[in-house]
Each structure stands twice: as structure tokens, then as C-alpha cells.
Image (spheres, coloured by chain):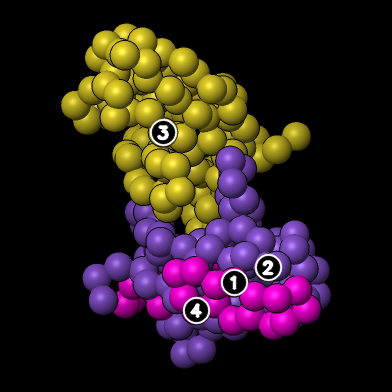
Chain colours: A purple, B yellow
């Protein structure tokens, strides 16, 4: 596709369940970012993948959060044993990461934990 | 101190006025700078890059002051549609990691 694609666009889950959020970046983009944003708040950095380098996981809020990026393309963010405070919009972005590093965002996944 | 800081606002500005806000960054090694715009419940989208020489795009002017480590965004003849949150981003070419400000909320009033 032409842009960053995220799925699902909305997810309602019960507290304690695991969820997987998917991000399909723009083809050829080596950098991929996951962010979390609560209503009215700024972007909270979660994790950053850059090429074959080890990901920067410094933003993951707890060990219930993990992410992987297979084949340098699609990424999956997994949240285990979801809690109500995990409710937010999860945004994925990708960039070429060489020269002009403009990031393009997907439309996000709105996660609601009930 | 946060790596990138912005006044959260909101800036309440009458339509047609000029408004400016700044974004300060702490790492002098920062190399690339951008302004993004985020509408309510939407994803951020690039507004403009910020070059060392400054750049202008229609009613929008962005400037970089490396000595004082800040970037600025000036909006002239503001429109109701300019109401949004403006996010500044800096990157370091060492690892291309994006460092985001928390955003400045702008409200243009008729």
C-alpha cells in the first residue's frame, strides 16, 4: 500500500486478555516506531526498530509489552494481560531513516480495555 | 529536563492574527527538525521541515536557531482550519531516532 497500515483500527478487549496490534510500514522504510497516545496527551514512545539493529525498547512501560518486526517489514505489538490503563491509541510510524527522516503515521489502533 | 519542550498552550488566537510558538531541544547534536500537525483524534502529519536557513510555505514560516537550540513556527493570517496541535520533532543522524515534543495546542477563534 501507499501508506502505513495498522490493524485493527479499533479493538475492545476484556481486562486480562492478550492483544496483538499490527503495523505494515511503507515499503522500503527501514525505521519503524510504535507510540501510545492517550486522549489529549502527547506521543509516548514505546519502541523503535531500525534496520537490523537491536530495537530500542526503552519506552515499553512494562514486561507485558513486547514487539517484533519480522523480515524488516511488518511489526506486531503485543500486550499481555491487558489492564484498563493500557487503553489508548497505539500509533505506528515508519521512515526511510536516511537523510530526510520524515515519519509517516498509520491511522492508529484505538484500544479499549473493559 | 525533557529533550524537546513545547508550551502546551492552548493558544487562543483570533482569526486573521499572526501566532508564533517555539520548541526548545536539549541535544546540540540534533540534526533534523520538523513541525507536525495533529488534528483531534487523527494521526500526526508532517507540516514542514525546518532547514538551517529557515523556510517558508505559504502562511507558515519555520526557523532554526542552533545557538539557542530552538525552532519556531510562525503562522500568518491564521484560519479556523489552523486549529490543531503542533508537534515539533528533532532527530540525530547517529540513529535517526525521533524525539517528539508534547505539542502546542492552537485554537483559532472567529
The residue that appears at 36% across and 48% down in the rendered structure is: B45
Give the number of the mark in front: 1 or 3: 1
Co-location on one chain, circles 2 and 1: yes
The numbered mark at residue A22 is 4
Q: CA distance from mark 2 to mark 4?
A: 17 Å
Q: CA distance from mark 3 to mark 2?
A: 27 Å
Co-location on one chain, circles 2 and 4: yes
Q: Is residue A99 left or right of residue B96?
A: left
Chain under callout 2: A
Q: CA distance from mark 1 to mark 3?
A: 27 Å
Q: CA distance from mark 2 to mark 1?
A: 6 Å
Q: Which residue is mark 1?
A: A12
Could you say which quadrant of the image residue B27 lies in? top right
Q: Quadrant of the N terminus of chain A?
A: bottom left
The numbered mark at residue A83 is none
Nearer the observer, B28 or B48: B48
Chain under callout 1: A
Does the magenta-highlighted stretch encompass residue A52?
Answer: no
Amino acid at each position: 500500500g501507499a501508506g502505513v497500515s495498522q490493524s485493527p483500527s479499533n479493538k475492545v478487549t476484556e481486562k486480562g486478555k492478550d492483544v496483538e496490534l499490527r503495523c505494515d510500514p511503507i515499503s522500503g522504510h527501514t525505521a519503524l516506531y510504535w507510540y501510545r497516545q492517550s486522549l489529549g496527551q502527547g506521543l509516548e514512545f514505546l519502541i523503535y526498530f531500525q534496520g537490523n539493529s537491536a530495537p530500542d525498547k526503552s519506552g515499553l512501560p512494562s514486561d507485558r509489552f513486547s514487539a517484533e518486526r519480522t523480515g524488516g517489514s511488518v511489526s506486531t505489538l503485543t500486550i499481555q494481560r491487558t489492564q484498563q490503563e493500557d487503553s489508548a491509541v497505539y500509533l505506528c510510524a515508519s521512515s526511510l531513516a536516511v537523510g530526510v527522516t520524515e515519519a509517516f503515521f498509520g491511522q492508529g489502533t484505538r484500544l479499549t480495555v473493559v | 529536563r525533557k529533550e524537546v519542550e513545547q508550551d502546551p498552550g492552548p493558544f487562543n488566537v483570533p482569526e486573521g492574527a499572526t501566532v508564533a510558538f517555539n520548541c526548545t531541544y536539549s541535544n546540540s547534536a540534533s540534526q533534523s527538525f520538523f513541525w507536525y500537525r495533529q488534528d483531534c483524534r487523527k494521526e500526526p502529519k508532517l507540516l514542514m521541515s525546518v532547514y538551517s536557513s529557515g523556510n517558508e510555505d505559504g502562511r507558515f514560516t519555520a526557523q532554526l536557531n542552533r545557538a539557542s537550540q530552538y525552532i519556531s513556527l510562525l503562522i500568518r493570517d491564521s484560519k479556523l482550519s489552523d486549529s490543531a496541535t503542533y508537534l515539533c520533532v528533532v532527530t540525530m543522524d547517529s540513529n535517526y531516532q525521533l524525539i517528539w515534543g508534547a505539542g502546542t495546542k492552537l485554537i483559532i477563534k472567529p
